Image (cartoon, helix red, strand yellow):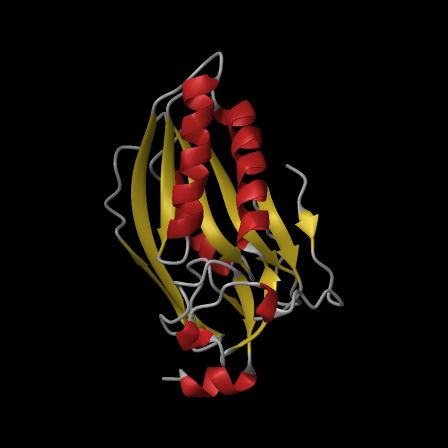
């Protein structure tokens, strides 16, 4: 398992006025929690760790939609650069699965996995790319389905893992940041489909949760 950056509960983030925030979200954001540049730097290092571990055989990169798409795209850009400039390279193919387990800011009891008709994974190195892991329940359900395809290897990378009492102890193989139990948005993480278009990972104001509640 790779190292991760732990952000402690007392870390409140950064003043939003130091960053570029879209006008339509200025009144909704409390603080910038993880700036975009820091996300990209951490993603570059994760790509290097992944290629060191998995870069000897064809990799199928599996993006968990919708929240994982920006992390997935940036991670693959870094992996592609390593493929182009390194001493060795391996084929990278991509596939997608969509999982829904949230309504407003609370996990739902029902987990919906859409797009299970995946490419043939038999004998391949599979890299599951996720945005955030909280209880681990959703990921364990997905991994159970993937193992039926008999891949050579499955590894999971998550940009964020949340420190929560609800977690049964599941931890992915690669972690970007370990964060306290705060509800965060931005960098494709959403609140009822809003805030995916923020570059930074941010903390919402409570009144914003009411504003966009469904």
Q: Quadrant of the C terminus?
A: bottom left
State whether residue 2 is above or below residue 212: above
Q: Residue at x 53, y 53 (%)?
A: 36
Front residue (pair 90, 152):
90
In the shown orientation, is residue 31 left or right of residue 83?
right
Residue 184 pos. (x, y %)? 54, 67
Residue 33 pos. (x, y %)? 61, 63
**For the view shown, which residue lies furthest in the top direction?**
87
In the shown orientation, is residue 10 left or right of residue 123?
right
Q: Residue at x 46, y 50 (%)?
A: 130
- Residue 43 in view, yes or no: yes
Q: Residue at x 51, y 33 (%)?
A: 47
State whether residue 31 is above or below residue 72: below
State whether residue 38 is above or below residue 106: above
Q: Tell me which corner region of the image, top left, top right, bottom left or bottom right, holds residue 62.
A: top left
Q: Tell me which corner region of the image, top left, top right, bottom left or bottom right, holds residue 53.
A: top right
Q: Residue at x 73, y 66 (%)?
A: 9
**For the view shown, which residue lies furthest in the right direction?**
10
Front residue (pair 64, 154):
64
Residue 89 pos. (x, y %)? 42, 17
Q: Quadrant of the N terminus?
A: top right
- Residue 152 in view, yes or no: no
Residue 16 pos. (x, y %)? 58, 69
């Amino acid at each position: 398992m790779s190292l991760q950056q732990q952000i402690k509960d007392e870390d409140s983030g950064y003043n939003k006025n130091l960053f570029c925030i879209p006008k339509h979200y200025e009144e909704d954001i409390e603080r910038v929690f993880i700036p975009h540049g820091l996300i990209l730097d951490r993603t570059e290092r994760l790509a290097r760790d992944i290629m060191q571990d998995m870069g000897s055989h064809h990799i199928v990169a599996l993006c968990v939609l919708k929240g994982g798409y920006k992390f997935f795209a940036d991670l693959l850009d870094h992996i592609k650069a390593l493929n182009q400039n390194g001493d060795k390279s391996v084929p990278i193919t991509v596939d997608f699965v969509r999982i829904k387990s949230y309504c407003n800011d609370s996990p739902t009891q029902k987990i919906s996995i859409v797009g299970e008709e995946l490419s043939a994974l038999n004998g391949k190195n599979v890299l599951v790319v996720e945005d955030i892991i909280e209880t681990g329940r959703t990921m364990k359900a997905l991994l159970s389905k993937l193992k039926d395809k008999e891949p050579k290897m499955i590894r999971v990378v998550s940009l964020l893992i949340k420190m929560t009492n609800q977690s049964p102890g599941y931890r992915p193989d690669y972690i970007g940041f370990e964060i306290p139990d705060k509800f965060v948005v931005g960098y494709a993480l959403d609140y009822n489909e809003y805030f995916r278009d923020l570059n930074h990972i941010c903390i919402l104001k409570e009144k914003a949760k009411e504003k966009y509640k469904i």
